[in-house]
Image (cartoon, helix red, strand yellow):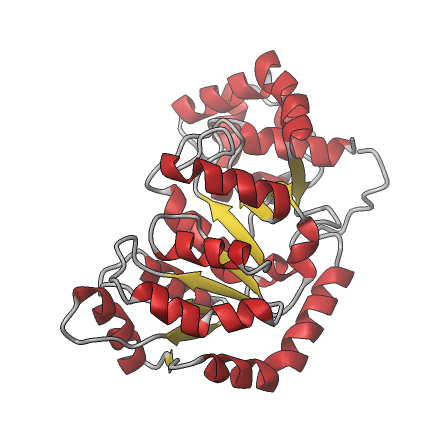
């Protein structure tokens, strides 16, 4: 394994690390060699972190169990860094791309367009299935890739619609592959991992944590040209995905519903704020046709930029 790539995966797995800190380390030490030579106090001084965090990071950097676990992780799943050719090309275009990802399944789905993120409440109304069957199922049958978060409710419905219609879907998790959440979706996870694609930013043994779900939402929106909200309350977590989609320059769509149910209030607010109202599949097909050239070009340009850092990946450093 290329040494720089190995070091990036190792650092990413250290418990004392955060994404901003990892970016900071890369900025000061692009080949990730000095960080292994620093003492705990030098880590604290050079990267402006507390002595407690520096001690955690130092210990993890030199922990043999963590080092040995990297090999077992790579046997269990595909470990992909931002330096690798398999890295999702559309994620290179977002402001805060994940540096390391874990894959199970068919990574070729990442280069297929159009892809649409489908999100919504964990407690959908009885009409949600009908809405999705009317709007999303025809897209699945036209070979669109459906991206969602494997949560209860709308996410689970989206993945199952793709499976039942021989379609394509990508699930982005807020936990590692050995700590599936929600537990009742274990069977769904296994189906997706065997025939579709499951992605996580977290090492396999990582449990779900509240902070992970807003983080994973930027990946859900980043993997698609647009995000559609089927049902959501005004303060729904789905609207975090919408905000991230807007920051990423993605399209945002909302399905209207009855004003008498709370689960549609977030969609109505989105439409008032400028989201595109979707009543049927044609609304999305028409929008995609108008933007297809732009997104296919972006996908191609991102694919050509295989190395995120200006480093020759064939060279051991």
Q: Is residue 316 above or below residue 117?
A: above
Quadrant location, the N terminus: top right
Left/right of residue 313 with respect to residue 254 in the rendered view: right
Q: Is residue 115 above or below residue 68?
A: below
Q: Is residue 21 above or below residue 272?
A: above
For this orientation, the residue located farthest to the right is 314
Viewer-closest of 266 and 91: 266
Left/right of residue 255 with respect to residue 289 in the rendered view: left
Q: Quadrant of residue 30?
A: top right
Instruction: Give x and y (percent) for residue 71.
Output: 68, 23
Viewer-closest of 41 and 304: 304
For this orientation, the residue located farthest to the front is 164
For this orientation, the residue located farthest to the left is 260
Instruction: Give x and y (percent) for residue 200.
Output: 53, 42
Left/right of residue 218 with respect to residue 291 in the rendered view: left
Left/right of residue 143 with respect to residue 136 in the rendered view: right
Instruction: Give x and y (percent) for residue 44.
Output: 47, 28
Q: Quadrant of residue 209?
A: top left
Q: Residue at x 49, y 26 (%)?
A: 205
Disc tally is: 0
Q: Residue at x 70, y 31 (%)?
A: 6
Q: Answer yes or no: is residue 24 visible.
A: no
Q: Answer yes or no: is residue 126 visible.
A: yes
Quadrant location, the C terminus: top right
Viewer-closest of 204 and 162: 162
Q: Residue at x 37, y 78 (%)?
A: 275
Instruction: Give x and y (percent) for residue 153.
Output: 33, 53
């Amino acid at each position: 394994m290329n040494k720089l790539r190995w070091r990036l995966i190792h650092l990413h797995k250290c418990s004392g690390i955060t994404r901003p800190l990892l970016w900071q380390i890369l900025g000061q030490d692009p080949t990730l060699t000095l960080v292994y030579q620093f003492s705990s106090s030098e880590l604290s001084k050079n990267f402006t972190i507390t002595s407690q965090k520096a001690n955690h990071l130092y210990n993890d950097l030199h922990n043999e169990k963590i080092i040995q676990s990297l090999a077992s992780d790579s046997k269990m799943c595909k470990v992909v860094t931002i330096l690798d050719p398999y890295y999702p090309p559309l994620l290179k275009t977002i402001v805060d791309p994940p540096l390391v990802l874990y894959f199970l399944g068919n990574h070729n789905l990442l280069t297929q367009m159009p892809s649409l993120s489908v999100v919504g409440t964990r407690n959908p109304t009885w009409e949600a299935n009908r809405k999705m069957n009317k709007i999303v199922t025809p897209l699945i049958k036209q070979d669109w890739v459906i991206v969602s978060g494997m949560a209860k409710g709308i996410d689970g419905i989206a993945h199952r619609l793709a499976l039942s219609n021989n379609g394509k879907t990508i699930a982005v998790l807020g936990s590692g592959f050995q700590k599936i959440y929600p537990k009742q979706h274990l069977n769904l996870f296994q189906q997706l991992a065997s025939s579709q694609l499951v992605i996580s930013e977290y090492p396999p043994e990582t449990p779900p944590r509240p902070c992970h779900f807003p983080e994973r939402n930027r990946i859900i929106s980043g993997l698609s040209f647009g995000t559609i909200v089927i049902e959501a309350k005004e303060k729904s977590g789905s609207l975090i995905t919408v905000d991230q989609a807007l920051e990423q320059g993605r399209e945002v769509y909302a399905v209207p519903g009855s004003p008498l149910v709370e689960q549609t209030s977030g969609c109505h607010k989105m439409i008032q704020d400028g989201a595109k109202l979707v009543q049927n599949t044609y609304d999305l097909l028409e929008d995609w046709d108008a933007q297809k050239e732009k997104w296919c070009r972006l996908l191609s340009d991102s694919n050509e930029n295989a190395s995120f850092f200006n480093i020759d990946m064939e060279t051991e450093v």
